Image (tube, rainbow, N blue to C red):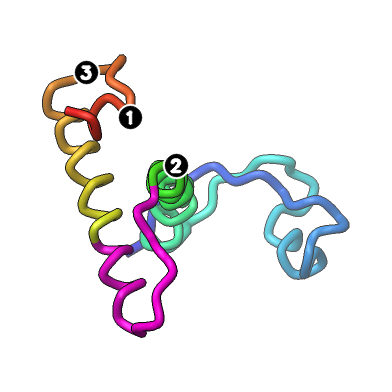
Amino acid sequence: MFTTTNRKRPSPTSTNAAIARAPFGDEVIKKLEVPTAINDYNHYMGSVDIANQYRASYEIHRKTDRVWFPIFFFFIDAEIVNAYRIQYISKKQQGLAVVIYLVN
């Protein structure tokens, strides 16, 4: 599946500029067919960073000698962030901070 989307011509100093700039010719912006998976990734890739920011602020991870404990702590952190995001979206509570959610 492909999606037609407007793309900007890469700068001349970008990686693989000669190859990436070829479809654009002299145009600065051009409609290109892009695989849907790549378009979705480019559009939503900031979501991973936001989730990591939520998780890092109130991380419960502790130093441990057991190999599986860090994985366990990661899943607990991820569950807390997911629960916060679900209630945020379902209740449309724009002003509720993560710390208030964790205290309640």
Which image quarter: residue 73?
bottom left
Looking at marks 3 and 2 on the same chain, the residue that comes earlier in the sequence is marked by 2
Q: Which residue is mark 1?
A: 99
- Residue 42, disc: none
Looking at marks 1 and 3 on the same chain, the residue that comes earlier in the sequence is marked by 3
Q: Residues within 10 Å of mark 2 (few under 14, many from 20)?
A: few
SS state under label 2: helix
Q: From which residue to which does the magenta span run?
A: 59-75
SS state under label 1: helix
Query: Residue 40 versus residue 35: which sits nearer the camera?
Result: 40
Quadrant (top left, top right, bottom left, bottom right) of the N terminus: bottom left
Residue type indicated by callout 1: Val
Given contact means CB atoms under 8 Å apart, are the residues at marks 2 and 1 in contact?
yes
Looking at marks 2 and 1 on the same chain, the residue that comes earlier in the sequence is marked by 2
Task: Find the distance from the CA under tag 1 to the CA under tag 3.
Answer: 14 Å
Residue type indicated by callout 2: Ser
Residue 73 part of the magenta-drawn span? yes
Q: What residue appears at the point 53 percent right and 53 percent down from the top-left corner?
A: 32
SS state under label 3: loop
Task: Find the distance from the CA under tag 3 to the CA under tag 2.
Answer: 20 Å
How far from the left and from the top, in percent, is residue 103?
A: 23, 30
- Residue 57, disc: 2
Compared across the picture, whether 11 is left or right of 36 comes to: right
Which image quarter: residue 63?
bottom left
How far from the left and from the top, in percent, is residue 31?
A: 54, 46
